[in-house]
Image (spheres, rainbow, N blue to C red):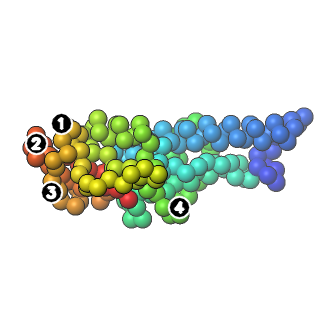
Amino acid sequence: MTGTTGPRAPAGTSAAAATAATTRLEAELAALAGSVPDPELPVLTLAELGVVRGVRMGEDGAAEVTLTPTYTGCPAIEAMSCDIERVLHDHGIPDVRVKTVLAPAWSTDDITAEGRRKLAEFGIAPPRPHAADGPVPLSLSVRCPHCGSTDTELLSRFSSTACKALRRCVACREPFDHFKEL
């Protein structure tokens, strides 16, 4: 059932209690949507990648998930949407709408610390964080995820996906992907 401000509360329930219940449900659904693995980098969840912007319950009782692609032409956005819909359906939410939004644009700064750690562990050099208040790095070096050396070279501006570049470590000679900064 729906009301004018979201799902209708059971009889005898205060508006504040209904709002709190809706907020808890939205947080639970956001955690479920965020737990979906990225289709191109399954070592990361969508929450770790930072592309799930929010979940809210619509006035009609549908779960509305807001998703921002890593770049405008990202071919994985359709797979992400379908996977989110499936996970929420599997958890008893019959009506799910995934909305793609381009603003504010996704940035590699949206990748969580855990996501960066997982990328490096998986053999992909994580993007360098933008310095908000700290010193600006004078080097454009990328650290090798295999041996830690910063003596690396660019082999190709594009790798297995458009958001990654192919690099090689001069020290250990291993090739590796680098998640490009945006």
Q: Residue at x 22, y 61 (%)?
A: 157
* Mark 4 secondary-structure assignment: loop
Q: Nearer the viewer, mark 2 or mark 4?
A: 2
Residue at point 49% right, 57% down?
A: 68
State how far apart marks 2 and 4 are (Cα): 39 Å
Contact between labelled residues 2 and 1, with CB atoms less than 8 Å apart: yes
Badge 3 density bin: few <14, some 14–19, many ≥20, Cα 10 Å: some
Q: Nearer the viewer, residue 97 or 153?
A: 153
Q: Earlier in the sequence, mark 3 or mark 1?
A: 1
User: From the viewer's perspective, is residue 26 above or below residue 66?
Assistant: above
Which residue corresponds to mark 2?
Answer: 171
Q: Position of residue 160 (x, y in %)?
A: 24, 53
Q: In the image, what residue type sits under mark 4?
A: Pro
Q: Taking the image as drawn, is residue 108 in sight? A: no
Q: Residue at x 40, y 61 (%)?
A: 71
Residue annotated with mark 4: 104
Could you tell me the amino acid type at mark 3? Leu
Picture coordinates of residue 80 (x, y %)? 44, 50
> What mark, if any, has residue 155 been given in the picture?
3
Camera sees residue 84: yes
Residue depicted at x 59% and y 49%: 54
User: In the drawing, does residue 143 fall left or right of residue 64?
Assistant: left
